[in-house]
Image (cartoon, helix red, strand yellow):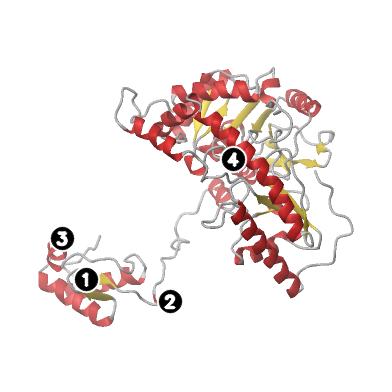
Amino acid sequence: MLVLDRDADVPMHRQLYEKLRAEILAGHLKADTRLPPTRLMAEDLGVSRNTVITTYDTLLAEGYLESRSGSGTWVATLPADAVTQRNSVGRAGAPSLSSRGTRMANQPRDRTIPDRIAFHPGYPEIKAFPFSTWARLLKRHARYSHEDLYGYHWVTGHPRLKAAIAEYLRASRGVECNPEQVIVVNGTQAALDILARMLVDEGDICWMEEPGYVGAQNALLSAGARLVPLPVGPDGWSLDDETRPSPRLIFVTPSCQWPLGCVMRMEDRLRLLQIAERHDAWIVEDDYDSEYRFRGRPIPAMQGLDKSGRVIYVGTFAKTLFPSLRIGFIVVPPHLSEGFKRVASNTGHYPSLLLQAALADFISEGYFATHLRRMRRLYADRQKVFVAECRRHLADWLTIDENDAGMQLVARFTRGLEDEILWQAAQRQGVNFSPLSRQFFHSPPQQGAILGYAGIDLKTMREGISSLRAAFVNLESSGALGPPERALPPRP
């Protein structure tokens, strides 16, 4: 995209020199980038070859380029402070973001960091996934077949995948639905974005678990909702507050509360359904990792108890398979199916049909159920080892208990400490986790660490705990830790 001005007083070779030099200094032409041969560059720009040769020679002499025998001219490696990136804030006078865009851009995010899986919460075991089977199923559908997987079809999901999901949910989660009620989307966050757009108007009140899932907070706030906390603590969900304003929507994770891991009692589920009916409110049930229950029978989803069609169920394959698959789903009441079909089409929140077809086979041919059984046993064993190792090496600084479900545990501090300070110290030791305080939106945040154990083998687990211990020791030696707490918060 180099454009030279033939009518300018500046010679062509000088114009070309200035533009190439600017591209190099801006970082757009990166080190070890091979430049076109002088003849090809001259033809593309419509200038003489001598013009390009003169430019290259000047840049070579100044150290911006280097010549490699037999392989042409390359961009040289410059000192880090010599290369400046273009200002990402924007130019003066550029239009500003919309109010919605500003709200979305200001929301926090929680993400994994490459090579720092320990101890990011919600991260599954990837190495144990049957990739050879998955590759065979993908290959089966990658060839053009009688199924049209390459057009703008089935925007709410591949019919066979919708049927497989509906059958699985009925059998394993007690969800009452038919395939037409299943909307396949690009993961949980896409589902929450669609639901926020469809169900919430600017200023609508939404009850949000406190502490609660940041992704749901972000989607609702971005839609203009007013969040009202629904406290969750040792005794479960606080449903008694009659002064809480009437909601348009209630967001809950009843089968394994995020992040505390507690399970909503049946009487509270029935009561919450009554509250929603009394206020004519929607309930969004996020069932993000209910498959992993280690003791007792799985508790059926709230959606199966709903008799008035106001519970919308959200699920994902990110926790059961692998996160980058980016396939989740929504189960909507029958009368909303057609509207959600249009929204899915208009927002583009639908995943590749090729992946959906392979996933449909993965479920229908029994591989999904087999993988789930293996992972359930593996995660149960890992949780026991993880708790024992934490108690053995980190007891001076935190307490942690086993849980009946989930892929992560909440650790509480025995000393006065802000979890963000520990998070920064852990990052320096190569360890990643999610600070508990980030999950609080209204009330004073509690301090602690949400530690994921599911996706790490024993060797990585021990290395991560050793690194986390080093972070605590460094904080203690620097005086950042307060005195021992008199009484720790009760375990939810």
The reply to whether discs 4 and 2 touch (Cβ–Cβ < 8 Å) is no
**Mark seen at residue 73:** 1
Q: Earlier in the sequence, mark 1 or mark 3?
A: 3
* Amino acid type for the residue under numbered disc 2: Asp
Residue 56 lies, in percent from the top left, at 20, 74
Label 2 crowd (10 A; few <14 / some 14-19 / many >=20): few
Q: Which residue is mark 2?
A: 81
* Amino acid type for the residue under numbered disc 3: Asp
The residue shown at (22%, 72%) is: 15
Q: Which residue is mark 4?
A: 223
The reply to whether discs 4 and 1 touch (Cβ–Cβ < 8 Å) is no
**Mark toward the viewer: 3 or 2:** 2
Label 4 crowd (10 A; few <14 / some 14-19 / many >=20): many
Give above or below for 119 relative to 305.
Answer: below
Using the image as rendered, state which of residue 243 and residue 40 is in the foreground. 40
Using the image as rendered, state which of residue 394 and residue 49 is in the foreground. 394
**Mark toward the viewer: 4 or 1:** 1
Real-space CA distance between mark 3 and mark 2, rounded to the nearest whole angstrom: 32 Å
* Amino acid type for the residue under numbered disc 4: Ala
Give above or below for 396 relative to 101.
Answer: below
Real-space CA distance between mark 2 and mark 1, rounded to the nearest whole angstrom: 23 Å
Q: Which residue is mark 3?
A: 44
* Secondary element type, mark 4: loop
* Amino acid type for the residue under numbered disc 1: Thr
Real-space CA distance between mark 1 and mark 3, rounded to the nearest whole angstrom: 17 Å
Q: Earlier in the sequence, mark 3 or mark 2?
A: 3
Residue 317 lies, in percent from the top left, at 54, 36
